[in-house]
Amino acid sequence: MEAFFCKELIRQEVTSERFIPIPEEVREAYRIYRPSPMFRAIRLERLLKTPAKIYYKYEGVSPPGSHKPNTAIPQAFYNQKEGIQRLTTETGAGQWGSSLAFAGMIFDLKVTVYMVKVSYDNKPYRKVMMGVYGAEVFPSPSNKTQIGKKILEDDPESPGSLGIAISEAIEDCVNSKNTKYSLGSVLNHVLHHQTITGQEAIEQIKMAEDYPDIIIGCVGGGSNFAGIANPFYYEKIRGKAVKETHFIAVESTAAPSFTEGEYTYDFGDTGCMTPLLKMYTLGHGFIPDPIHAGGLRYHGKAPITSLMVKNGDIEPRAHHQVDAMQAAMTFIQAEGLIPAPESAHGLKAVIDEALKCKKTGESKTILTLLSGHGYFDMKAYESFLGGKLEPYIMAKDKIESTVNEIRHLNP
């Protein structure tokens, strides 16, 4: 793993330590936007006429506008401390690329981002933001790497995928000096950094003299969901939770690895350059439909959240983008904030649970992590308002085809 990551991140990936102190340099950078606020969505409760209490923790207050700096900052810090001069990475919707570019600016590191082509074309201002922070950005698949060239030869119109972009970033990394690769989700150390959101949420909801019956989050690779859920789950298994909290992870029907995929070993990237990961997956050859929630287009899920789903600790759900955007519009009508399309999938489940409470008369407390704002996602909202948004539900025969290609990797 040292070909990809700096030593401290590898240590955090495999350590048996339960807690890792946050370095003061990281805390100083966090202070730019942390703690992030938690709101009670009283106007949404009134609109839905539900007895449920709805809280959302809002990560859109960070400079790049999402939860992703929570891991980008420590990753950049640890790499700089070990003398690394440049980081490569991939990005789907652009939130992760923007965040690593921001962190690279703080810690004086060069950053190269391979951005999934469909998002590169649809979200030009994310690309501009990365440039403002000093990063160089290439559409993926690109002509900068051998794997990018091969994919373009086979399909010059390829929309790209996170798996392809990861392969390009890794290839760039291993062929360059003083360069490491940085990943925005899936792996243990990334999920661990994101638990800053859940740790804050525990303290904030106690200030409100409340505690969640249900915690809901959208899930692409898994870091957003794990960030809010894992600290509460830890309280639950220690017997310290005030209630028997239920956890719901919401994915897209266009990339339904939890609900339709297979729990097995697979590569984290299309080019088969990563170690094998035990996770729910659609197969590393999976190419997603061009949904607007770029952060939900990944073929696999984090091993930690995958194991929790396998063990029944997390309930997985899948919603298509039309229903998700309708939920976002309901949220906007009540609260005013425009959520990212990824967060909209979680909001769909929040509204569903609140309406269940309306039917039963139960007053449950629902907590969700609003992972980022949607102010760079106006194309998605434009398509929705114009009736041009397609639901995109992945066909079962396509799932079977891509999953079948990885079965030889497992005994």
Image: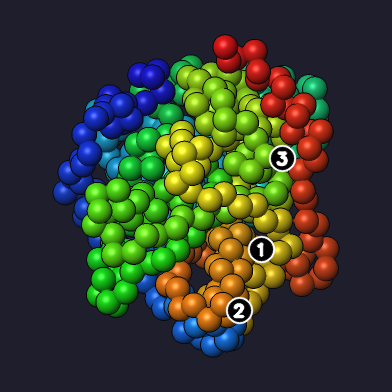
Dot 2 alpha-carbon crowd within 10 angstroms: few under 14, some 14 to 19, many 20 or more = few
Q: Which mark is residue 144?
A: none
Q: Which mark is residue 324?
A: 1
Which one is closest to the eye, mark 1 or mark 3? 1
Q: Inspect this view and state whether residue 305 appears.
A: no
Q: Nearer the viewer, residue 120 or 267?
A: 267
Which one is closest to the eye, mark 2 or mark 1? 2
Label 3 amino acid? Pro
Q: Nearer the viewer, residue 242 or 326?
A: 242
Instruction: Please determine whether, in this image, residue 182 is positioned above or below residue 45.
Output: above
Q: Position of residue 273 (x, y in %)?
A: 53, 18
* Left or right: residue 398 compared with residue 205: right
Q: CA distance from mark 2 to mark 1?
A: 21 Å
Label 1 amino acid? Ala
Q: Secondary structure at mark 2?
A: helix
Q: Residue at 71% of width from left, 40% of height from top?
A: 288
Q: CA distance from mark 2 to mark 3?
A: 36 Å
| Residue position for label 3 | 288
Which quadrant, please, contains the C terminus? top right
Q: CA distance from mark 1 to mark 3?
A: 17 Å
